Image: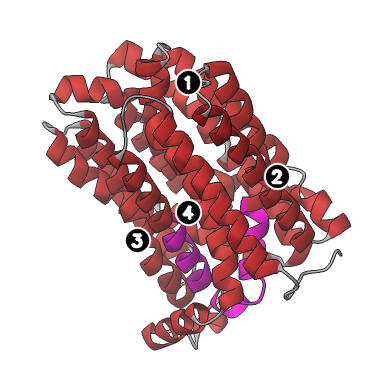
Amino acid sequence: MQSHFFRTALVLGLLSAIGPFAIDMYLPALPSIGQSLGASMAAVQLSLMAFFVSMGIGQIIYGPVSDMFGRKAPLYFGLLLFAAGSIGCALAPDVQTLVVLRFIQGLGACAGMVIPRAIVRDLHTGHDAARLMSLLMLVFSVSPILAPLAGSFLIEWFGWRSVFWAVTVAAALGLALLATSLPETRPAADRVNSSVGSALAGYGKLLRDRHYLGLVLIGAFGMASFFAYLANSSFIMIDHYGLTPREYSFTFSVNAAAFIGVSQFTGQLSQRFGLVKVVNFAVAGFAAVMGVLLLVNLAGVDRLDVLIALLFVGFGFLGLVVPTTAVLALEEHGEIAGTASALMGTIQFVVGALVMAVVGLFVDGSARPMVLGIAGSAIAAYGFARFTLGGTRSVPAV
């Protein structure tokens, strides 16, 4: 039983990580892509934003489809589409083509984001679901640690196009795991009442559920802070602070390690204190640390060590926020878990893309616009937590 639990977490985590791998390996390449294709920083960042937007749009489709046809079939389709988009990106002759192909690549990648969350809900609820979700995140979060390092080596040895050939190989591995190691968790009997009409009704129900939407927005603004970091950190670390791509990859990995490490305490803490208390504590800590980061920056302190240290602590708190809010949001919607997971993912990526776009309007080469985006998102997450969890429904400790 225990070995099956960990094997499921491993497979779901690897499937979830394929899309983020295509983001995180790509980050060290952003400056060199601009130079190679003769494109501006804003144009290159647009290729990143296109991926995020398509990841958000696609999830709204994959979720209901997985409720109607089972979890595995849309995963196969998504991985094949992702592989095709990756090959196209590797051959892109200009930045405009790259942006379009990154959009297609994202439409495939999002299957691996939305469907594993629904599979977790198919299998477990309560703190068992939180434990599986945190283990999934452990595997999933290997991506932001290893991918930038792997990407920097590939770029140094073979150029930025090799990143896309590498993620094509990752997609092939995902297809092999899907075929051999993951059983169908939504049997045909559970799909009888699933249709386009029921999907639309499900979205209507979810959009009227303030508790669900509040929890989703807590997680969405938490992830938006990380997206603001993703979109801007390579330019700031490399161009502003003078790090090499390899040094940048290391600093990025340090902050990702905080997110991963703390997330592994989710199951234990939720079992002891309950999911709602864990969320409230984590969101308050996250907002407080990022607020301090903003005040320090506004005071004129522009030091890399201070930035990394405060991000390390803040993203550690975020590691508790993301899995717990996801479990709480899906807890009461097991019959439409795919649809609920899809809407959650779409809202997260749309909010993330909007925050990235707003931060992009104020880019000036310094860390301040990024810090403002991170801190603003953290404070918004805290506000939604106070509104949503101030004495509402809760999941008790088990």
The kind of residue on which mark 2 rests is Gly
Q: Residue beneath label 3, please?
A: 58
The kind of residue on which mark 4 rests is Met
- Measure the C-alpha gap from mark 4 to mark 1: 23 Å
Q: Residue beneath label 4, please?
A: 113
31 in relation to 242, above or below = below
- Are circles 3 and 4 on residues that touch, CB within 8 Å? no
Q: Residue beneath label 1, please?
A: 249
Assign a secondary structure to mark 3. helix
- Residue shown at 36%/41% (left/top)? 359
Residues 383 and 221: in front is 383
The image quadrant that residue 138 belongs to is: top right
Choose the circle earlier in sequence order: 3 or 1.
3
Q: In the rendered structure, does residue 181 fall within the stretch colored magenta?
A: no
Choose the circle earlier in sequence order: 2 or 4.
4
- Residue shown at 64%/61% (left/top)? 385
Residues 38 and 132: in front is 38
Residue 374, percent from left and from top? 50, 41
- Are circles 1 and 2 on residues that touch, CB within 8 Å? no
Choose the circle earlier in sequence order: 4 or 1.
4
74 in relation to 227, above or below = below
Quadrant for the C terminus, please.
Answer: bottom right
Q: Residue beneath label 2, please?
A: 285
- Measure the C-alpha gap from mark 3 to mark 4: 10 Å
Assign a secondary structure to mark 2. helix
